[in-house]
Amino acid sequence: MTEITDSVLINNLYRILCLPEFGLNRFREIFEEIGILSEVENGEIRHEQIRRINEWMERNRGSNNDEIRFIEYLEKFRKLSKSEGNFNEQLEVTKNIIDYLLKLLPTPSSQLLLLFVLYMRIMWRVMLSYLPKTQEHALRIAKFRRDNIIHSFRVFLLGCYILYSLYDEKGDYITKCFKEDLKLICECLSDDFKRLIFGTLPDEIIRQHIEEVEFNIRDILLMWLLPSLFHDIGKPVEDAVEEIKRLMNTYNIEGIDIDSLVFSVAEVLKVNSNKVEEFTELLEKILRDSDNNNSNFCGQIRQFLRNRTGSEKKWDHGILSAMMLYSLGDITEELSIGERLSTELLRNSPYLLLLLYPLIAIMLHTEPSKYIFCTSLTQLLIICDELQEWNRITAIGDREVRIFPCKSLHMELENREMRVFIPYERPIDVISQEIFRRFDPKRRWREIAKGNPVCRNNDLLLQKITVHVLLDQTCKICTIEIHPNGINYSISHPFLY
């Protein structure tokens, strides 16, 4: 198994940036100038190579070059992640990394994906002030609240590691998985919406057209970027609703109708109950009522949407995040003419099809046991979101605590199977022990194991995921095996690792 740390994931990102097909030649030139290009390309970055990177960065301190600044912030993140008590500094560095990441994205091979890139840049700009402000407040008042901004960046890094590892082994298969996803979604579209996108083309020609679309690792990683970075942007609204409910119950407050509240995410981006219902109704119109070939997939998505309408589940951050991303086109006052045109194009046929793909993944990621075998993008988001526990921070008063007491995980990928080992460290101080007790990894994985996977899809990145969690110093192991036929949960002692 390979130990997965922040440092390992940064090294993998460097490796991706230097791929000729990724199209960012300036990074290849930088690492060649440092004298470590071959080590970067072969995934052999060690302490010596990191030392040389930092020496080179010191010689170029003060440079306004975007690629140099991006590497500088990644190296700062590498250093900060190895120590504790620097959450605010780590948060600022992460925001800068995402800024430069979105700024430096390569030009996609498709015009559709180019609009996708513009969409992400606009969304990050809109959310940049809202997310840190609301997270800071939640960390102060919530009983159990974790960081989501640094977490989302680590989710992105972990997904890049998995995708590159699989692509390096079976590039054609990875491409096939994403194309099969798009075919599956196309076949679930209503006839009216399908005509808007493809005119009167028969289904066989549509499938052939998708098959002929050229995808490379650059395009796949661009599609991964949106759900990984933005899957939790609705969490502040979900937190706010829960906090309002607690206040109402504690002080017996009457006369507050939560469904009538409006949350101003940005000056002109409002979130309320009506918008969620309008969004779900739109998606229900896009999807067909039934599909003989894909009734499980289409039927389950429609059932998911019905469950989010007229119930408290409308405030689930998965559906909220997807709705907020779609609503970006409403922020016309804050956008330039070109940006306004881009968002409108992406929200309307035929471009909505490309946006629908990550929106489905974002919507479904909050129910991992049900939808982990839905689409490859949904599966990847659920896996990375659930596994990203190392170095994740919460706060109690003026104290920062690693809510998940582990600093790494161990992973093996082979033959469409993933095996993961998570070594928890039992906290020493009383406050951290209390936080760990509230988290209770046994309960979390047992909740996942209660589900019954739906939307079974055979053309997925992974067909089996096995997670071993070391619970405490007694070496008890919680094991969860996830496969299309169900989910198994067990505790064993000892586990020979």
Image (tube, helix red, strand yellow):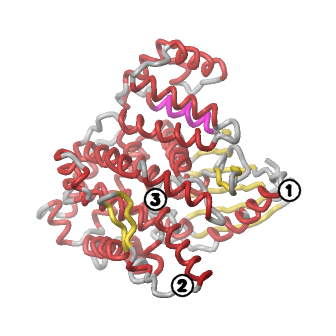
Q: CA distance from mark 3 to mark 2?
A: 39 Å
What residue is disc 1 on? 494
What residue is disc 2 on? 253
Q: Where's residue 438, x and y in %?
A: 72, 66
Q: Where's residue 95, x and y in %?
A: 48, 41
Give the farthest residue toward the left. 200
User: Does residue 327 appear left or right of residue 160 in this picture?
Assistant: left
In the figure, residue 268 lies in which quadrant? bottom left
What residue is disc 3 on? 378
Residue beneath the point at 69% across and 57% down:
396
- Above or below, 245 against 188 in this view is below
Looking at the rendered structure, the kind of residue marked 3 is Thr
Q: Which mark is residue 264?
A: none
Q: Where's residue 129, x and y in %?
A: 42, 50
Q: Nearer the viewer, residue 94 or 406?
A: 94
Residue beneath the point at 72% across and 55% down:
468
Q: CA distance from mark 2 to mark 1?
A: 51 Å
Q: Which callout, 1 or 3, points to the residue nearer the camera?
A: 3
